[in-house]
Each structure stands twice: as structure tokens, then as C-alpha cells.
């Protein structure tokens, strides 16, 4: 198995609106995969489909070569941490660990207690009284101590303060190194993902815009700036993601399949955040054009 | 055991920074032959970075012949940098101290000294390449 | 999963046990007194027509507390299925959905089907056990009163409710068990649809109340084949000026499903014949003429045709009705499973 998540034209609909459309991915194992996109783009939908909390309305999805939530064995191989780390408010920390032990055959009880003790969590404290960061850590413990092959996290640090955020990511990376986990985590902020992810999926407006190893994406996307150009006279081999023009200058963020030989262009590297923003604005632009076209046709 | 740090805004890729820090540690004598590099899991637990980043850095160091990985145990320093650790260069250090004293007597402040050194170093390197 | 079900259910179970224990203590405190009243009454040695007055005498000697406990027991058994339903069933699925803990529960190493199966089975079993325990201890306590009622139906209004009456039928025997399981699975299923606890409670209550009203009125009368008989027109038949029977001779606690008068030719009539409407006129003639409308009709060959269920059909009817509710409960449980498996967030 080389792909942890394999989808083919995956789609999910809520009443009349498609939350995820035409999603085709082959996510390799052994990576920390970042799923980034604005709120409402479909990230939670995709992750819920991966762990079997939702069923597809179109296309297929295979996780670790199996159907999500198809049976005990499949469920045991995937750990999940939902948004805002829901826990049972009335159950104590120790109760939660017992829950994990009773409901998971591969539960590593030593690992679970080691983590909880290192986090200084009071075993008897009700989970409802924990801070946001502690709740997230408890939920992470539950997900990690069941020894999954894949860990799926939905916006795990979105509501955490900077210290809790850093500690969470430190713990997560340690678990990845120790257990050789594959991880898929989503965020609407690139900054959260930049340090830890080596594979990126950009999801905007229910569609996948770009996906690939971070190194490869950074190597193939460049910022080109030069004298003002007519949009139709751009060199070949350039997949322009976003463009901006002043009266004298044109700046492009483009995906290059080969070297750009035109000396008029100044080529510089692109940071991950700018890359993602470019794809987001491309999607917004397309939607605006579609709406505009729609309005014109209506006339 | 050395400890890594990361400058997220330096524009230098994280794995390159790690490599640089190992080489620097070798130069300064903080790492000697036979010493163990920090375990991958400890590095990522401290820096919150991807383990593959650390593995990539260690692999490149291994390719350069500076370290060797012993499966199940860790990664250990095996080689030395060209020129050996800085502590072995007593005469060079004394020459440099004398030059610095001369530069100060000539009235140069810290920034001027750095600029003078940097520009001379660069032009000398270019001459070497050419 | 058994541990988790228990851990989440702890408070409700303990509350139910405490309530049951409190009621049991009350019954234990008043039971012996009631039993001795019964033992010393003339009911134990009566036979034939002497039993009805003996029963009435027994009722007259009941203390106020006995009556209160009698009514309390009936009330408790009437509401217990509904309470179990809405407090145990409504949150079963709805709470996990409302608090979003399903994200945790359904991504452990058990399937949703297993999760629901254990929760339904365990909680359902406890619901049945609690209801049955309540029903049994009450039946033990109220045994003297039930026996007396079966002898002399028609005395103080409160104790004229025989075993087939709507309230008594629903609170004795095994029907409470069926209601409890039905209410529980109904609430669970509604909770799966509404995804919120409070609306689930309200809707379940409404549906359950409607079913409990519809059952004795429209469904129960048709669940068992009735017996038929003809009897003489008794004075009681003419209560309220109608010609329906109140009592089946020889079957004191029978359930009268329908009755009407027949004239001497066997045709049904619904009104008192004109000739029998003025009893005083007949009486004035003196002699052996009949004096009441009933006797008048009787002498003219009028009979009462009665369709009824004798007490021998009590237990078959109990089983049939309980069976219906169990079948409904199974269907509702199946619906909950189906609803969960095709969940769309």
C-alpha cells in the first residue's frame, strides 16, 4: 500500500449544494499531509468521508486500501480528532482512557498513561473542566494510543492559544516519529501547516486546486515579474495561477514545467502561504467570472 | 548532545538549517567523532517540524560522509570537516586577533570591520572560482 | 462497550433503582395490613351471591392510605413507560449528536451498528426489568383488592374498574413491559431523526400519548374474538334510557364490547317499546302485571344480545397487545439502525 487515501471523483452533497466535487487524490503514505482552504471549502467533509462518518454521494474513496468505517479492523487503523476536540464532559480523564482501552483492541495503555502524565493531566478531572489545549491533548492521546496507521485531524489547533498550539504540534510530531504514522490535518491557516507538513492539498470551493509534495510545489511555482504584458502574450509552458498588472509592471505566480528563458522576467521563489493564496484567489476569480457570465446570459 | 533551533523567517529551508548547525557544531568542537546526534523524535518534539525534514538532513550529512546511521541505535558522527575543528587552528586564530587589533587602531567600528571582511572574502572566493 | 454504556447510563439507572426502592418500602409497609384485612373479611369464605356484599364490605374497611397507595401504584405504572422512554431513549442517540461526541464514539474500533446494538440491548433490558419489577411488586401488594374487584364489580366507583377497564388493563399483567419497550425504542428513533434531545422528548410524548389513547378505544376491542350470549333485560340495562347491557350474567368482570336489545322475533331494537314506557299505568291494574320497563319488556319476550370478552380471554389479550407493542419496538429499533448507517452528518 502506498496511498493512504485514494479518491476518484469523490463528491458529497447536502440537500442541493455540493460540499465536495470531483475530488481525485492519491495521498502517499509516510507523510504529514496538510489540507488547507478557506472555511466552507469542504475540508471537514473530505475528512469525515475518510473516517467513515459520511457516505459519498458520488465517486469512491479508499483509505489504507479499505472502505472507511467498514468494520472493526478498518476503524482500528484510523484515528480521528474532530474539530474542537469533542470529549464526554461528564467523564473523567481516566474514564476516557478506559473508554479507549475497552473500545480498541490495539490500545497501548502504557503510551496513553505516559502521555497523560507528561501533560500533567489530573486523572480524576472531568473532561468538561479541561482547558481547550488540554482537551485537544486528551483527544490526541485517545487517537494516538490506539496505534493507528493513519491519523486524521480536523483543524486541531484552530482554537488554541500559541503555546498550546506549539505544544500540540510538538506532541503530534513526536508521535509521528515514534510510530511512523501518516497524518492528514486540515487548517484554514497555512502558517499552522508550514512547519509540519511535507505534502499539501489545497481545497477551495469544494474542489481540489492543487496537491503534491511541498518540496515539489515550491520548486515548480515561481513568482515572475517584468514589464507590463498583454495577458495573451505570455510565454508557453506557464500555467498562470494568479496575475496582477499595474500600468508598468506585470507580476505572475505561475507553475512552470521547464525553465523560463525570456530574460525580461525576474524569477523568484514563492513561499507556501503565497502559493496557497494564489490558488484561493484563482478560485474566487473563476467563481466571479462564472457568476458574471451567468448574469450576462440572463440578459 | 547538541540542540537544534529553527529560524522560520530566514528563508533558508529547515533541513538546510539543521545541516548548517551540525557542521557549525563540528567546527566549534561541540560535536566530536563518535558523538550521537539528537534522536529524530527528540528533534521534532522540540521544534514541531516534520520528521522527514530531520531524516533528510541526516541523510545528506551521511552522504557527505560526516555521520553514519546505526539502525535501532541512532546517528553518530564519523567524519570531520576539511580543516578539522576550529580549536585545531590556534595560529590562524592568533593572526586574526592581531588583524582585528590593527583594524580597531585604524579607527574602524564593528560594522565597518564586518563589511571589510565580507567584501574581501567574497572577491577572494570569486577569484578562486575564476 | 458494555462498560461505556453503563458509565453513561449510571445516573439514570441509580435514580430508577432508588425510586423503585422507595415505592417498594411503601408497599412493604402497607401490604401486610391490607393482606390481613383481606384474610379477616368474609370474602375468603363466601360463595355465590354472598360474595358481592362481602367484597363491598371489604372495600368499606380500607384505610385512606390503602386507597392512596392503590391509586399511586396505578399512576406510577401508567407513567413509567413514558418516563423511561423520554429520559432513557431520547438521549440515547440524540445526546451523542447534540454534543458532537459521536465524532469520538464512532471512530473507535467498533462499528456504529455494534455501538447501537449494545446501547439498545442493555438499556432496553434494564427498562424492561424496572417496569416488570414495579409491576410485580405492585401486583403482589394489590392482589387482595384485585380479587375483591373480580367478585363484586359495581360497588364504590373506584373499585368498579375491572381487569379489562382501560386503566387497569394497561397497568397490570405484562402490558407495561410492552409499553416500556415501545416508548424506549420510539424515543431512540425520534432522537435519531431530530438530533436534539428536547424535541425528541416532546415528540415521543405526543406520539406515545396518542397511541395509548387509541389502543383501548379503537384497537383493543378487536384483538380477540368475542363471545356472544343473550340475557334477560335487567333493570340496569335501562340506565340513561338506553338499551345497552352493563353486566353479563355469570361473568362478573367481562368486557362488554357491544350490546343491544332484541324483540321476541329476534330483531334488534334501540328504544323502549311504547307499551312499556309507563310502568305506573300497568301497575295500577294490579295483579301480577310487571311494574318496571325492564320487567315489562322481559314479559313481552325482549332479550339482550351481548358481545363480550370473558375473563378467560384476559391473558390471551394481554399477550396479543404486548406482542403488538414488541413488534412495533422491533421495527423502531430496526429503523434506528438503518438511520444511523446511512447518516449524512
Image (spheres, coloured by chain):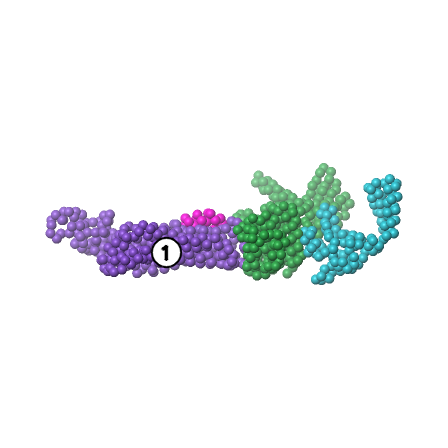
Chain colours: A green, B cyan, C purple
Count of residue discs: 1
Q: Image point 16% across, 54% down: which residue?
A: C299
Residue extending farthest top: A247
Q: Is residue C193 magenta?
A: yes
Question: Residue at point 26% right, 54% down?
Answer: C56
Locate residue C32 relative to residue C192 in the image: left or right.
left
Helix, strand or loop for the magenta stretch, by majority: helix
User: What residue would you read off at disc 1?
Assistant: C28
| Location of residue A138 in the rendering, given as x and y in whole percent from the top left corner | 59, 52
Q: Residue shown at 13%/49% (left/top)?
A: C283
- Looking at the image, can residue A260 be seen? yes
Q: Is residue A70 visible?
A: no
Q: Position of residue B57 (x, y in %)?
A: 74, 55
Position in image of residue C237 (x %, y %): 23, 52
> Between residues C209 and A283, which one lies in front from this camera angle?
C209
Chain of the residue on which disc 1 is drawn: C
Q: Residue lying farthest bottom?
A: B71
- Which element is circle 1 on? helix
Q: Is A273 contained in the magenta span?
A: no
> To which quarter of the image does residue B26 belong?
bottom right
Q: Is C152 drawn above or below residue A287 in the view shown?
A: below
Q: Residue at x 46, y 56 (%)?
A: C123
Q: Residues within 10 Å of mark 1 (few under 14, many from 20)?
A: few
Which segment is the magenta one? C186-207
Asked whether A167 or C294 is in front, the reply is A167
Answer with left or right where residue C84 lies relative to residue A147: left
Amino acid at each position: 500500500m502506498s496511498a493512504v487515501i485514494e479518491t476518484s471523483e469523490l463528491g458529497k452533497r447536502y440537500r442541493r449544494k455540493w460540499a465536495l466535487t470531483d475530488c481525485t487524490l492519491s495521498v502517499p503514505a509516510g507523510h504529514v499531509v496538510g489540507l488547507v482552504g478557506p472555511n466552507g471549502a469542504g475540508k471537514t467533509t473530505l475528512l469525515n468521508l475518510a473516517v467513515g462518518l459520511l457516505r459519498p454521494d458520488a465517486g469512491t474513496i479508499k483509505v489504507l486500501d479499505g472502505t472507511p468505517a467498514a468494520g472493526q479492523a478498518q476503524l482500528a487503523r484510523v484515528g480521528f480528532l474532530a474539530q474542537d476536540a469533542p470529549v464526554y464532559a461528564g467523564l473523567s480523564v481516566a474514564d476516557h482512557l478506559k473508554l479507549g482501552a475497552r473500545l480498541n483492541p490495539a490500545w497501548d495503555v502504557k503510551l496513553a498513561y505516559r502521555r497523560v502524565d507528561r501533560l500533567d493531566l489530573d486523572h480524576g478531572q472531568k473532561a468538561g473542566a479541561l482547558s481547550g489545549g488540554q482537551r485537544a491533548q486528551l483527544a490526541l492521546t485517545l487517537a494516538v494510543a490506539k496505534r493507528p496507521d493513519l491519523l486524521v485531524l480536523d483543524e486541531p489547533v484552530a482554537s488554541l492559544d500559541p503555546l498550546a498550539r506549539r505544544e500540540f504540534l510538538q506532541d503530534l510530531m513526536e508521535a509521528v516519529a515514534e510510530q511512523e504514522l501518516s497524518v492528514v490535518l486540515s487548517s484554514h491557516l497555512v502558517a499552522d501547516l508550514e512547519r509540519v507538513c511535507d505534502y499539501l492539498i489545497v481545497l477551495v470551493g469544494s474542489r481540489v486546486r492543487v496537491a503534491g509534495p511541498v518540496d515539489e510545489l515550491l520548486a515548480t511555482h515561481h513568482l515572475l515579474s517584468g514589464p507590463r504584458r498583454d495577458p495573451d502574450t505570455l510565454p508557453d509552458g506557464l500555467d498562470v495561477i494568479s496575475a496582477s498588472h499595474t500600468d508598468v509592471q506585470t507580476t505572475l505566480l505561475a507553475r512552470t514545467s521547464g525553465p523560463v528563458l525570456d530574460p525580461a522576467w525576474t524569477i523568484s521563489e514563492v513561499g507556501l502561504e503565497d502559493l496557497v493564496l494564489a490558488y484561493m484567489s484563482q478560485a474566487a476569480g473563476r467563481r466571479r467570472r462564472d457568476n458574471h457570465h451567468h448574469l450576462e446570459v440572463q440578459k | 548532545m547538541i540542540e537544534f533551533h529553527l529560524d522560520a523567517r530566514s528563508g533558508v529551508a529547515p533541513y538546510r538549517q539543521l545541516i548548517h548547525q551540525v557542521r557549525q557544531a563540528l567546527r566549534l568542537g561541540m560535536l566530536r567523532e563518535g558523538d550521537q546526534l539528537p534522536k529524530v523524535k527528540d528533534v521534532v518534539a522540540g521544534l514541531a517540524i516534520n520528521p522527514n525534514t530531520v531524516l533528510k538532513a541526516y541523510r545528506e550529512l551521511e552522504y557527505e560522509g560526516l555521520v553514519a546511521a546505526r539502525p535501532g541505535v541512532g546517528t553518530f558522527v564519523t567524519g570531520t570537516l576539511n580543516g578539522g575543528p576550529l580549536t585545531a587552528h590556534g595560529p590562524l586564530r592568533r593572526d586574526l586577533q592581531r588583524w582585528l587589533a590593527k583594524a580597531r587602531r585604524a579607527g574602524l567600528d564593528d560594522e565597518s570591520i564586518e563589511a571589510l571582511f565580507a567584501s574581501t572574502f567574497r572577491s577572494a572566493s570569486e577569484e578562486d572560482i575564476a | 462497550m458494555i462498560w461505556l454504556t453503563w458509565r453513561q447510563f449510571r445516573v439514570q439507572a441509580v435514580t430508577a433503582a432508588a425510586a423503585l426502592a422507595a415505592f417498594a418500602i411503601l408497599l412493604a409497609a402497607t401490604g401486610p395490613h391490607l393482606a390481613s384485612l383481606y384474610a379477616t373479611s368474609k370474602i375468603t369464605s363466601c360463595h355465590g351471591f354472598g360474595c358481592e356484599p362481602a367484597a363491598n364490605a371489604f372495600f368499606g374497611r380500607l384505610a385512606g392510605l390503602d386507597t392512596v397507595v392503590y391509586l399511586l401504584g396505578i399512576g406510577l405504572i401508567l407513567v413509567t413507560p413514558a418516563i423511561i422512554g423520554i429520559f432513557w431513549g431520547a438521549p440515547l442517540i440524540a445526546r451523542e449528536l447534540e454534543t458532537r461526541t459521536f465524532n469520538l464514539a464512532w471512530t473507535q474500533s467498533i462499528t456504529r451498528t455494534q455501538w447501537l446494538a449494545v446501547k439498545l440491548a442493555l438499556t432496553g433490558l434494564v427498562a424492561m426489568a424496572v417496569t416488570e419489577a414495579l409491576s410485580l411488586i405492585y401486583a403482589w401488594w394489590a392482589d387482595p383488592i384485585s380479587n375483591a374487584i373480580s367478585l363484586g364489580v359495581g360497588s364504590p366507583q373506584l373499585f368498579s374498574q375491572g381487569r379489562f377497564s382501560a386503566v387497569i388493563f394497561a397497568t397490570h399483567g405484562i402490558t407495561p413491559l410492552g409499553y416500556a419497550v415501545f416508548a424506549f425504542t420510539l424515543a431512540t428513533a425520534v432522537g435519531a431523526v431530530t438530533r436534539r434531545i428536547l424535541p425528541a422528548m416532546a415528540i415521543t410524548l405526543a406520539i406515545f400519548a396518542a397511541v395509548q389513547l387509541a389502543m383501548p378505544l379503537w384497537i383493543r376491542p378487536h384483538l380477540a374474538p368475542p363471545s356472544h350470549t343473550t340475557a334477560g333485560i335487567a333493570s340496569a340495562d335501562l340506565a340513561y334510557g338506553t338499551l345497552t347491557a352493563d353486566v353479563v350474567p355469570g361473568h362478573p368482570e367481562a368486557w362488554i364490547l357491544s350490546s343491544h336489545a332484541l324483540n321476541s322475533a329476534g330483531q334488534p331494537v334501540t328504544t323502549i317499546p311504547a307499551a312499556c314506557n309507563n310502568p305506573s299505568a300497568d301497575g295500577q291494574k294490579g295483579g301480577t302485571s310487571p311494574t318496571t320497563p325492564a320487567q315489562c319488556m322481559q314479559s313481552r319476550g325482549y332479550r339482550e344480545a351481548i358481545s363480550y370478552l370473558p375473563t378467560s380471554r384476559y391473558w390471551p389479550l394481554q399477550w396479543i397487545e404486548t406482542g403488538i407493542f414488541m413488534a412495533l419496538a422491533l421495527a423502531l429499533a430496526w429503523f434506528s439502525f438503518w438511520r444511523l448507517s446511512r447518516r449524512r452528518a
